[in-house]
Image: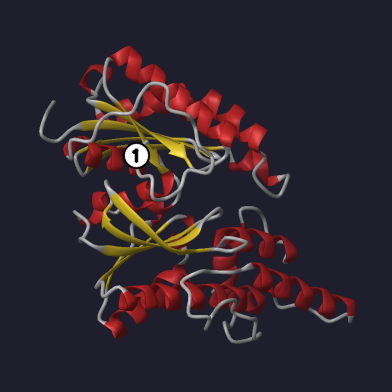
Amino acid sequence: MADQPLVLGIETSCDETGVGIVRGHTLLANTIASSVEQHARFGGVVPEVASRAHLEAMTPAVERALAEAGVGFGDIDAIAVTAGPGLAGALLVGVAAAKAYSLGLGVPLYGVNHLAAHVAVDQLEHGPLPKPCVALLVSGGHSSLLLVPDVARDVISLGSTVDDAAGEAFDKVARVLGLPFPGGPHIDREARDGSGTAVAFPRGKYDDGTLDFSFSGLKTAVARWVEARRAAGESIHVPDVAASFQEAVVDVLTRKAIAACRRYDVRDLLIGGGVAANSRLRTLARERCQAAGIRLRVPRPGLCTDNGAMVAALGADLVSGGAAPSALTIPADSSLPITTVHV
């Protein structure tokens, strides 16, 4: 096996079938087949629909990734796959496919943690991670603060959401405002024409001294505010509501992230996950990191959302670090804890 392993990564934790190929920390292919349009009419992801979509997309996605990378199956040194957390049925499709490719090609299999992969992917754009760093991961299913001494070996949970994740709150507020699913990009777009101070929405767990998050109360506050004005026959300026909601979310996220860096004397902050594509989050994080003397790393938006490249990147770290391959009997674990980087 070469010093720079050629790793194929498979991601099926939710509604996107991602296949990525990397050589070390060099990205060669990142193919994504999304089933989001199939879920849009339901206003959220339907697990059974997602699983079926993964089954149909898997083989074409792998073939496209190989073609994009200009390599063949015989060139692959290892297979990496998201083993959890995520939707159980969706994970099973990816894990089963990865086992088949591993066995058929005679190459090692690495089952990895979806959240740790969101951290590892930044290396494909900005090089090796500082050791340690703090990672803020924000997506539809997760809002977490992590201390990362070594992404391939040691990830420590500092805080997480106690109810709705940030991305989940974006989706629910978008529905209240009559915006399409998924809500994040649409709220971001609407907010550009609104004022973040138009409505004083609450900020959950803002000054509680913990590094945990809570967005359920904020989501409910937006819904009640909108309902009250509609009941009174008043018009609602959607951009102002979107901007004020968005500001409440990113204010809490960045405040807690900076607090984590200070508490653990870490000078590097990484932000990942689908919500990391939000323009206001990126701007406020950059401003607050500059003021605090903290270096900020955020992957480009295409690497923030779920993708196979992030799985391949973490797999490459495991291979290069001499980690033992996973057994072909590894399960898909929908509740895999972040402290388990590799199964």
Is residue 278 positioned above or below 290 on the image?
above
Query: With 109 as the anchor, is 144 left or right in this view?
Result: right
Residue marked by disc 1: 342
Q: Residue furthest left?
A: 3
Under circle 1, the secondary element is loop
Residue 201 found in image quarter: bottom right
Q: Point out residue 278 in the picture as x, y percentages from the top left corner.
A: 47, 65
Quarter holding the N terminus is top left
Residue 94 rendering spot, x and y as whole percentages: 47, 29
Q: How many marks?
A: 1
Residue type of the residue flagged with mark 1: His
Instruction: Report the side of 247 relative to 297 (left or right).
Output: right
State which quarter of the image contains the C terminus. Answer: top left
Q: Is residue 339 above or below residue 177?
A: above
The vertical placement of 53 against 261, above or below, is above
326 or 275, which is in the foreground? 326
Q: Position of residue 34 (x, y in %)?
A: 53, 39
Residue 172: x percent and y percent? 68, 60
Q: How is the image coloured?
A: secondary structure
Circle 1: is it few (<14), some (14-19), or many (20+) Cα within 10 Å?
many
Q: Residue at x 66, y 76 (%)?
A: 241
Q: Name the residue nearer the viewer: 180 or 49.
A: 49
Quarter occupied by residue 147? bottom left
Q: Which residue lies at the image location 44% right of the left edge and 55% below the top edge?
A: 273
Q: Nearer the viewer, residue 156 or 64?
A: 156
The answer to whether 270 is drawn above or below residue 331 in the figure is below
Name which residue lies at 34% across and 12% down: 104
